[in-house]
Image (spheres, grey):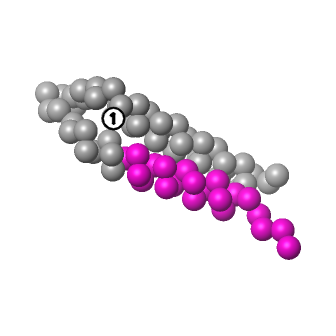
Amino acid sequence: MNSQVLGLRVAGTIFGLMCLGQLLRLITRAELLVGSHPIPLWASGIAVVIAGSLSVWLWTISHPVTR
C-alpha cells in the first residue's frame, strides 16, 4: 500500500466519522449553537449526505482495479 492509498483511506475514514457524528445529531435532535445563533437540523442532513458521499467515494477510489 503506497502513501496515496493510505491518504485516501484516512480521509475516507475521517469523512465517515463526520457523517456518523452529524447523523447522531439528527437522531438525538441535539441543539447546536455557534455564538448565540442556532444551527438548524436540516444543515446536519446536508452534511450527512455530503460527508457520506465523500467517504464512500474516497474508499472506492482507494481500491485499485485489478484486471
Residue in the image at 28% along x and 26% along y: 30
Percent coordinates x, y for residue 37 in the rendering: 14, 32
- Disc 1 on helix, strand or loop? helix
Using the image, determine if residue 22 lies above or below residue 55: above
Residue in the image at 14% along x and 27% along y: 36
Q: How many marks?
A: 1
Using the image, determine if residue 44 lies above or below residue 27: below
Percent coordinates x, y for residue 15 in the rendering: 52, 45
Q: Is residue 37 left or right of residue 8?
A: left
- Which residue lies most toward the right here? 67
Q: Is residue 67 left or right of residue 18?
A: right
Using the image, determine if residue 2 lies above or below residue 18: below
Badge 1 crowding class, 10 Å Cα cut-off, few under 14, some 14 to 19, many 20 or more, is some
Residue in the image at 33% along x and 35% along y: 26
Front residue of 12/46: it is 46
Q: What kind of residue is marked 1?
A: Leu
Percent coordinates x, y for residue 43 in the rendering: 27, 45
Residue 27 lies in quadrant? top left
Tag 1 residue = 26
Q: Main secondary structure of the magenta part?
A: helix
Q: Which residues are magenta?
A: 47-67
- Which residue lies most toward the left here? 36
- Which residue lies most toward the bottom here? 67
Using the image, determine if residue 64 lies above or below residue 26: below
Q: Is residue 67 left or right of residue 8?
A: right
1 within the magenta span: no
Q: Quadrant of the C terminus?
A: bottom right
